[in-house]
Image (cartoon, rainbow, N blue to C red):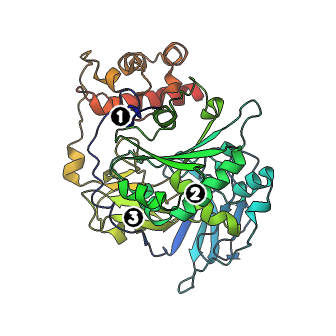
Amino acid sequence: MLSFFEKTFPHGVHPPTHKSKTQAKPVRRLPFAPELVLPLSQHFGKASTSLVHAGQEVVRGEPLAKADGFMSVPLHAPATGTVDRIELMRTARGPKTEAIVLKVHPGAAQEVLYDLPQEISKMTQEELVDAVQETGMVGLGGASFPTHVKMRVPEEHQVDTVLVNGCECEPYLTTDHRVMLEQPDDLLAGIRIAMRTVGAKKAVIGVEDNKLDAVKEIRAVLPQDDSISIQTVPTKYPQGAEKMLTKAILNREVPSGGFPSAIGVSVFNVATLAELGRLLPHSRGLIERVVTVTGPGVKKPGNYLVALGTPIRFVMEYAGFNGGAGQLILGGPMMGQTAASLDVPITKGIGGILVMTEEDASKRPHTVHPCIKCSSCVKACPIQLNPSYLGMLAHKREYTVMADKFNLFDCFECGSCSFVCPSGIPLVQYFRIAKAVLKN
């Protein structure tokens, strides 16, 4: 058995956490915006197919779009209202995509009227996976990978452990922290669902040691049979990456180019499972999520329960911000991306809005200096790649060499290399461009 101090991974970095502004604030519901923009593609995989038409009235929770195949999920109405139009709209990803624009009925009670209780304990493994797909659930940690796909374990693999990621190592963000504190019973219900779908006999919840209050709340509801346990790990970035957490908690290494199921593990985010534990017993769909709104440029930082489709501009007006899109990062400072526009909507994969001031934004390095061969990036990379050499290859546009000989696709873009680079080289951005070129 590994000791506490060994329950981590090689390398990594220790950026300032900046979580104090929001970690002690309970989740509050954000008011409904007058208009919601709901892209049909809010997940990794094929876009969903619309079930509604302009002028149609819908109730909160009603399906708006159906899954288009296995690698797809449905979309549900976050509010009672009228479908105004279906057209191409801007999203956080940048390009326009087809979206349902919903006019919210003013003064409506906004209760979830679409509800069909089901007995999960009597469902087969196959029925459970199908039911998970019908919720429209995706990974709420940011990847937006359809949850039901992860639960369909390949026949050649056998999963013995569900690993639950409660680390939330990204600076500023406290969404998962609040979910663990406020929804421990939902989380346990979701973990049991995940265990049944993948056939695992045990589950381990990994939480960084700067969230001991959450550990205390969860331990109070753990089952007596030790089938579900919780383990603290040292606070270090990117501890929450599935490869890093699997190494830290279970001392198992995910093979290059492989998935955790190849070594008997399925990894899920705590917010994903807590929401699943809340929704699935009622056959409800994912219509809202907790979003951390924080940073030096916002007057009312906190964790807000936000209806999907809410324009970021509406969120910012409520939280007290009068700046521009260039000062907003969707996600955290390490892996997040600058907002394309204040008018793009909150989607299933957006768990945080980091708001900078003009002064903070101006402090970002604008000049890139040549690599000084200091090896700081090599010492920081948790996958133990050579970011310096990959960066030089990227500069020469040797993208195929990066992938074939230097394991480019093992990089999960954590940003540790860019964080420590004294020359200000945007290495992770180079790697993203290289991957995009190769995929196209």
Residue 186, position as x, y percentages in the image: 57, 63
CA gap between label 2 and label 3 equals: 29 Å
Residue 121, position as x, y percentages in the image: 75, 61
Is residue 47 placed above or below 364 in the rendered structure? below
Decide which of tag 1 and tag 3 comes sooner along the chain: 1
For label 3, the residue is 303
Q: Is residue 99 visible?
A: no
SS under mark 1: helix
SS under mark 3: strand
At horizontal 28% and vertical 63% (from top left) the residue drawn is 298
Residue 373, position as x, y percentages in the image: 27, 15
Q: Which of 127 and 51 is in front in this view?
A: 127
| Mark toward the viewer: 1 or 3 | 1
Image quarter of residue 163: top right
Disc assigned to residue 309: none
Q: How many marks?
A: 3
Disc assigned to residue 5: 1
Image quarter of residue 312: bottom left
Residue 222, position as x, y percentages in the image: 54, 57
Check disc 2: other Cα within 10 Å, few if <14, some if 14-19, many if 20+. Answer: few
Check disc 3: other Cα within 10 Å, few if <14, some if 14-19, many if 20+. Answer: many
For label 2, the residue is 223
CA gap between label 2 and label 1 equals: 26 Å
Q: Are marks 2 and 3 in contact (CB under 8 Å)?
A: no
Q: What residue type is labelled 3?
A: Asn
Q: Quadrant of the C terminus?
A: top right
Q: Is residue 260 visible?
A: yes
Decide which of tag 2 and tag 1 comes sooner along the chain: 1
